[in-house]
């Protein structure tokens, strides 16, 4: 009967016999080495004692940990055989390093099973293990020379035993085959995906290169395995259920932006397979992991490390304040990264340092631990994940960046920031050193990431330099006098030149600077939460909106605010008093339906000539945006740059009438002709464009455009709608494949949070207003053509004040309409109050609408 070892491994009586035989070989090895030592002409007593003692320690270690030693010996033997193997093609191939394609180089560098950076103590133990293995290999080689047949027999027995154990241990993982090239993965929320090739294998995680089936867009596929030997059926189903809930994780703040976090594009948990998939968009172009950066470029200077710290602390501040919905549908404050190291942080170098010497690069955080931890077997202890540990890990990252390495090449030991001699000798930035020591917890630790960033950005204290009188010889004094007469003059000239240059740059920036928006002041007079609204009717209530209007999209579209739920359903979950509220789509006149008591209230756009017996209350904004293909600031041919990021209403009329635009120069290599798009199946957007741009006087060219688009698009998309989603992809495709400039328009709520197109500032000439803003150095400014909407994810969101004041010309207001009759008004009035709370406004914002006010930070 086999004897159980741990959870899945078993070993038979035969295997025990193999262990005893291997142990006998070890004892023979000890005796033989001892006899060899004693047979010499002269041997020091200390050498003899050390040799015998060392071998006996190895025997004792072998007895205590037989399986680990068997595995180690077998792996060493297998490695030797592998390195000695030759392919009989006439000439032995030279050993070459892995030279994978440049595009996949930083993918291979990312550790799919990475944990946090090991502390020096942990690394010391690993180093001791390597030293012990080297000594063991040396002693084994002596025995092979003395008795090769005995050694070969021992190795054969060892390898056979270990192979049997390995087969039993990993048999369950091998039953999950690797995805074949060309295999399709279905069930995703955003489409189907095709596997192209395996990039990296693993025991529990595999990485593939693939494409989206619909448009051949490159993607990465991370495959997480649930082997039978590690997860029973119930555990596997629980992991999948949690995986699907995590799939709705939206690492964005209330304004829609995220903080340089590389998050999954899609997540798939097939019900009939023991694996799950994460889909990622292509890696950031020309990015490297920080470990690869150190290998290629060496250590960073103090200013570069400060920039890395500033960006990562901003990311951590966001994560640590993120409200995560737990698997029990509760909310938990704070999400640690849990996996912060040189492999999980990517750097994208934008350009050379600016005139003010500020490094121009961006740091992106990947590989959050919550995905990896979900697929660890129940028997594996998961290390602590906490904001405190994130700060410690960041301290080690910054220390390694300053040092340019993680291991001391002289001692082969890991660098330890607690040891003064391990700091770079040329490093003189005392303030930065104190800051890193506080991150590491060596000195007084920071309370949180926000406190750490405030300390990092604090102005440098003024240091008074004390002059020390020096006694010099007469000849030295004479020489210094001549030098002192030259240096002050040179320093004065240099100082005035720098001041003049600085003043000129300030003047130029002031003249060219776009209008600044005041930082928001959070002083909400509205209730914070839905539960704070009193008097909400709990009986049966019916409310309606028009067919194919913005409200039907916002309330009925799944997963806008919560995974697999509509906004209408989410409102009922958060506010049980709305359980009997029924939402319906109506193709009849909304006012008439309310009067006939077919509905208690309606959701619609602001009604200009509202009847006297009705009331309307604003609850949100939306707007029309005009866009062109987006191209980041690395592309030479940039349409937003050529347009200076803006367009006038007169130019829009010209474009949609003549398909041409005068007074502009397209980028080099781009056709001057313009291709026009409109969301034909979004009637509300088309009607708004007609009213705002043409004011009802439609040219024939515009009237014919819908039929032309339908004629061109239907063969490709069949019965799918020609809406904003369709024209976004077409505009980008025309630009990248046909070198054609495409113009389109649509609702902001349907195009926000994407980077296929760039929304232009719109207005009368000289009064164009950009609907999106971003935060730069504690100032809120409109986005610019150089803003990278795909990867420059510091922050951008709709400009609430421009919508509220109607400075942005293409806005419309969303309202709740209900009767003025006191008895019938209560349901509509209270529903409007619910939507105007901070919680209600945040839900509308997450669904894509512009809130009535800038929302306070989540508690």
Image (spheres, helix red, strand yellow):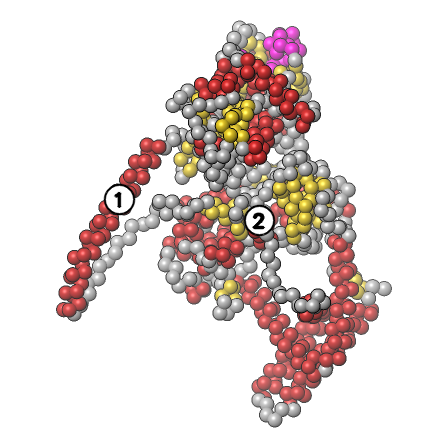
Image depth: mark 2 or mark 1 in front: 2
Give neighbour class at mark 1: few <14, some 14-19, many 20+ (Cα, 10 Å).
Answer: few
Residue marked by disc 1: 499
Coordinates of residue 653 in the picture (x, y in percent)? 48, 18
Q: Secondary structure at mark 2?
A: helix
Q: State the separation of the CA atoms marked 2 and 1.
A: 44 Å
Report the span colored magenta.
588-607
In the rendered image, residue 271, in percent from the top left (x then y), is placed at 75, 40
Residue nearest the observer in this picture, 41 or 312:
41
Q: Is 594 contained in the magenta span?
A: yes
Give coordinates of residue 319: x percent, y percent: 53, 43
Q: Which residue is farthest bottom?
A: 41
Residue ranking furthest to the right: 1
Residue at horizontal 46%, vertical 49%?
308
Task: In the rendered structure, find residue 224 and report the number of the disc placed on it.
Answer: none
Rendered residue at 38%/45% (across/down)? 354
Q: Nearer the viewer, residue 155 or 449?
A: 155
In the foreground, 258 or 644: 644
Whether residue 815 is visible, yes or no, is no
Q: Is residue 454 above or below residue 630?
A: below
Above/below status of 164 relative to 354: below
Ranked by sequence position, the earlier of labels 2 and 1 is 2
Q: Is residue 139 visible?
A: yes
From what the image shows, is residue 18 above or below residue 381?
below
Q: Which mark is residue 103?
A: 2
Q: Is residue 172 left or right of residue 119?
A: right
Quadrant containing the N terminus in the rendered view: bottom right
């Amino acid at each position: 009967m086999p004897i159980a070892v741990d959870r899945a491994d078993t070993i038979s009586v035969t295997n025990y016999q193999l262990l005893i035989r291997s142990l006998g070989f070890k004892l023979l090895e000890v005796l033989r080495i001892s006899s060899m030592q004693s047979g010499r002409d002269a041997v020091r007593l200390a050498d003899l004692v050390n040799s015998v003692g060392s071998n006996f320690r190895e025997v004792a270690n072998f007895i205590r940990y037989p399986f680990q030693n068997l595995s180690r010996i077998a792996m060493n033997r297998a490695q030797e055989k592998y390195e000695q193997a030759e392919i009989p093609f006439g000439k032995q191939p030279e050993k070459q390093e892995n030279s994978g394609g440049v595009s996949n180089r930083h993918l291979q560098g990312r550790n799919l099973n990475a944990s946090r950076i090991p502390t020096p103590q942990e690394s010391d133990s690993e180093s001791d293990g390597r030293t012990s293995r080297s000594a063991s290999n040396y002693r084994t080689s002596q025995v092979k020379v003395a008795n090769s047949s005995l050694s070969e027999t021992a190795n054969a027995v060892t390898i056979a035993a270990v192979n049997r154990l390995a087969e039993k241990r990993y048999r369950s993982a091998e039953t999950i085959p690797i995805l074949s090239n060309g295999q399709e993965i279905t069930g995703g929320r955003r489409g189907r995906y095709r596997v192209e090739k395996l990039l990296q294998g693993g025991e529990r995680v595999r990485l593939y290169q693939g494409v989206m089936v619909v448009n051949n867009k490159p993607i990465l596929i991370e495959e997480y395995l649930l082997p039978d030997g590690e997860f029973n059926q119930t555990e596997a189903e629980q992991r999948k259920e949690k995986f699907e809930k995590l799939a709705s994780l939206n690492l964005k703040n209330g304004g829609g932006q995220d903080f340089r976090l590389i998050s999954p594009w899609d997540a798939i948990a097939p019900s009939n397979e023991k694996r799950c998939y994460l889909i990622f968009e292509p890696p950031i172009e020309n990015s490297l992991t920080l470990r690869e950066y150190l290998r290629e470029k060496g250590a960073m200077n103090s200013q570069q490390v400060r920039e890395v710290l500033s960006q990562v602390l901003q990311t951590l501040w966001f994560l640590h304040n993120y409200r995560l919905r737990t698997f029990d549908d509760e909310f938990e404050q704070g999400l640690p990264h849990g996996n912060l190291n040189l492999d999980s942080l990517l750097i994208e170098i934008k350009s050379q340092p600016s005139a003010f010497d500020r490094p121009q690069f961006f740091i992106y955080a990947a590989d959050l631990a919550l995905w990896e931890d979900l697929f660890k077997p129940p028997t594996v202890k998961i290390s602590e994940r906490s904001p405190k540990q994130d700060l410690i890990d960041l301290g080690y990252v910054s220390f390694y960046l300053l040092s340019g390495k993680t291991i001391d090449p002289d001692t082969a030991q890991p660098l330890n920031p607690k040891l003064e001699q391990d700091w770079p000798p040329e490093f003189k930035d005392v303030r930065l050193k104190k800051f890193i020591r506080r991150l590491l917890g060596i000195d007084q630790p920071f309370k949180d990431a926000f406190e750490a960033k405030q300390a990092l950005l604090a102005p440098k204290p003024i240091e008074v330099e004390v002059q020390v009188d020096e006694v010099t010889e007469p000849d030295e004094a004479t020489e210094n006098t001549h030098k002192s007469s030259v240096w002050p003059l040179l320093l004065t000239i240099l100082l005035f030149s720098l001041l003049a240059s600085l003043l000129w740059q300030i003047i130029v920036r002031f003249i060219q600077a776009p209008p600044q928006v005041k930082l928001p002041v959070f002083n909400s007079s509205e209730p914070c939460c839905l539960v704070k609204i009193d008097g909400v009717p709990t009986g049966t209530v019916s409310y309606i909106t028009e067919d194919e209007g913005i409200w039907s999209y916002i309330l009925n579209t799944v997963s806008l605010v919560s995974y697999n739920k509509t906004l209408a359903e989410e409102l009922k979950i958060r506010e049980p008093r709305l359980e009997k509220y029924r939402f319906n789509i109506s193709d009849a006149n909304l006012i008439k339906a309310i009067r006939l008591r077919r509905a208690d209230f309606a959701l619609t756009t602001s009604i200009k000539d509202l009847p006297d017996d009705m009331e309307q209350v604003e609850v949100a904004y939306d707007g029309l945006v005009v866009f062109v293909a987006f191209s980041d600031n690395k592309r030479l041919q940039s349409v937003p740059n050529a347009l200076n990021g803006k367009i006038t209403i007169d130019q829009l009329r010209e474009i949609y009438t003549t398909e041409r635009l005068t007074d502009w120069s397209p980028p080099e290599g781009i056709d001057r002709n313009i291709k026009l798009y409109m969301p034909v199946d979004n009637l509300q957007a088309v009607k708004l464009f007609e009213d705002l741009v043409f004011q009802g006087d439609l040219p024939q060219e515009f009237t014919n455009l819908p039929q032309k688009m339908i004629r061109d698009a239907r063969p490709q998309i069949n019965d799918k709608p020609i809406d904003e989603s369709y024209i976004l992809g077409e505009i980008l495709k025309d630009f990248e494949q046909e070198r054609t400039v495409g113009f389109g328009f649509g609702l902001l709520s349907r195009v926000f949070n994407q980077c296929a197109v760039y929304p232009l500032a719109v207005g009368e000439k000289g009064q164009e207003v950009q609907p999106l803003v971003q935060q730069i150095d504690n100032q809120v400014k409109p986005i610019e053509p150089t803003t990278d909407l795909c990867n420059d994810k510091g922050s951008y969101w709709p400009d609430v004040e421009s919508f509220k004041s109607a400075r942005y010309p293409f806005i419309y207001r969303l309202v709740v309409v209900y009767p003025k009759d006191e008895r019938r008004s209560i349901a509509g009035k209270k529903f409007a109050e619910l939507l105007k709370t901070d919680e209600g406004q945040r839900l509308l914002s997450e669904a894509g609408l512009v809130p009535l006010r800038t929302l306070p930070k989540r508690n």
